[in-house]
Amino acid sequence: MSTASRRRLIRDFKRLSSDPPGGISGAPCADNIMVWNAVIFGPADTPFEDGTFRLVLTFEESYPNKPPTVKFLTKMFHPNVYANGELCLDILQNRWSPTYDVAAILTSIQSLLHDPNPNSPANAEAAQLFRDNMKEYVKRVRTTVEDSWMDGEEGTSG
Amino acid sequence: MSSDNSQLPLDQRKLSDLTDYEVASLTQELKAEEASKRPLVGEVEPLERLSDEYKNETFLAKIASLQRDSWTGLRRLRGDGDCFYRAFAFSYLERLIPLPPSAAQLALAKVESLLPLLDQAGFQKDIYDDFYEPLRDLLLALGPDSKLPRPTATSLHASFNDTETSNAIIVFLRLLTSAFLRANADDFTPFLFGLEDDPRFMLEGGAPTMDQFCSFHVEAVNKEADHIQITALTRALSVYTRIAYLDQSGAPPGGFGAGAGENGDVKVDFVEFEGESEEKLNGALLYRPGHYDVLYR
């Protein structure tokens, strides 16, 4: 079935695979182009360095006029990520523009990792530690980074 | 400000707990949901049908005054926050239909001359080209070198009800508006303001920067156009536009008494953008609080 959203997703995939921004990768599921798996590598020189964080992006037929829903599959400790993996990011909510493609979405999430938005806390504890106790914050993030390696192995074997 | 249930979706929280900013977001969500049931662009219908929707005497008197000024028709647009851009684009192209093909050629040259502003604003050509294509194709089809059948009001109406075409044109106009605002930031920045409790702009003393304004209020889908966006877009394209404001303003205190009868004093304010009209225009946009339609005579 060829619809505007599917055509656009094929383009997004071509763009992402021909000119991939550093530290991100993503591809549609083999049997459903509307669902993508993606991996963001923790940016260097941040507490998230060396982490491999897996996400799932779910698109509707209204894409690109409406944003996809994006969810971390890897357990995160971040001020703007909810316990269920959903995230609070303005471009995925009230600042969406159809000019954002999958590469732009993933790049924005990658920069959100080291640049949390204190105005929209989704994880109150992470937000509080980020603000008041950086040392403890980094420690907690490093734990999720180490866990993310295990998570990645499960992902490939399953 | 933030209560315990502040993590709940807006529509599950008590209205009295919401900040102005949250009420604005919720209003937009509800409008978008309601709007999805209407066509993107409606057929022209008689203006008197509008009177059936109002009991308010100021509105009724103003509609009557429009009719006396020989405004006869109305084309309704879906109220999804994109309505100004859609109404503007439709009316802009529809006005070219009866004109000689050179008018469309000129319009296209004007649009092409603005593309460098998009690059300057940091939009990538391979991305904005997709959104530009439908508008360019319509202008080309209205121009002198077209091998395609010339668009008519009917075919334009069909194009604008094709979601992909219609939305691409809106995205492109939003990018043009944004690029023009950014390129003329010195002129426009003094007019930027934010809702007082909008948490995003607290750091800047309540007003957004041009960059924030453009990304939140111009480029983002379904965000309504205000005076500043309308000024920027009409100025960028040099397109004369007039807007009839059908609102409560000018109502006599205490409303119309029984003696007011056929009150001819209540007029609809027409606001003109981008100079005086050189040609006698038979079109205008009709503004009702929060919404734009196209007006005909």
Image (spheres, rainbow, N blue to C red):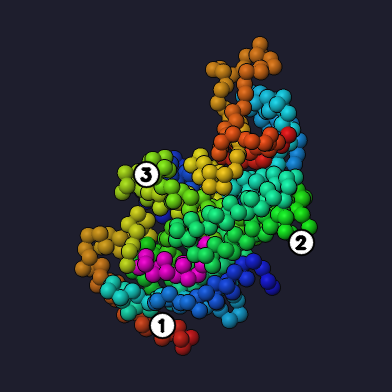
The Cα–Cα distance between marks 2 and 3, rounded to whole angstroms, is: 50 Å
- Mark 1, residues whose alpha carbon is within 10 Å: few (<14), some, or many (≥20)? some
Q: Are marks 2 and 3 on the same chain?
A: yes
Which quadrant is the N terminus of chain B positioned in? top left
Residue at point 75%, 48% (across, down): B153
Counting from the top left corner in percent of width and height, residue B32 is at 58, 50
Camera-side residue: B73 or B2?
B73
Q: Pointer 1: what residue?
A: A152
Camera-side residue: A9 or B134?
B134
At label 1, which amino acid type do we have?
Answer: Gly
Q: Quadrant of residue B46?
A: top right
What x and y, as percent, mark residue B56? 63, 26
Please report the bounds of the magenta region as a residue range: A99-113
Magenta span: predominant SS is: helix
Query: Can you say whether A79 is above or below B75 in the image?
Result: below
Q: CA distance from mark 1 to mark 2?
A: 56 Å
- Compared to residue B111, the image places residue B284 above or below, namely above
- Residues under numbered marks 1 and 2 in contact, where contact means CB atoms less than 8 Å apart: no
Instruction: Name the subunit of mark 2.
Output: B
The residue closer to the viewer here, B113 or A128, is: B113
Whether residue A119 appears in magenta in the rendering, the answer is: no
From the image, tell me which residue sits under label 2. Answer: B147
**Which of the chains bears the disc numbered 3?**
B
Secondary structure of the residue carrying numbered label 3 = loop
Label ID, residue B207: 3
Q: Amino acid at mark 2?
A: Lys
Left or right: where B229 falls relative to B191 = right
Give the amino acid type for the residue marked by disc 3 in the picture: Ala
State which quarter of the image contains the C terminus of chain B: top right
**Residue B132 position in % (x across, y down):** 59, 59
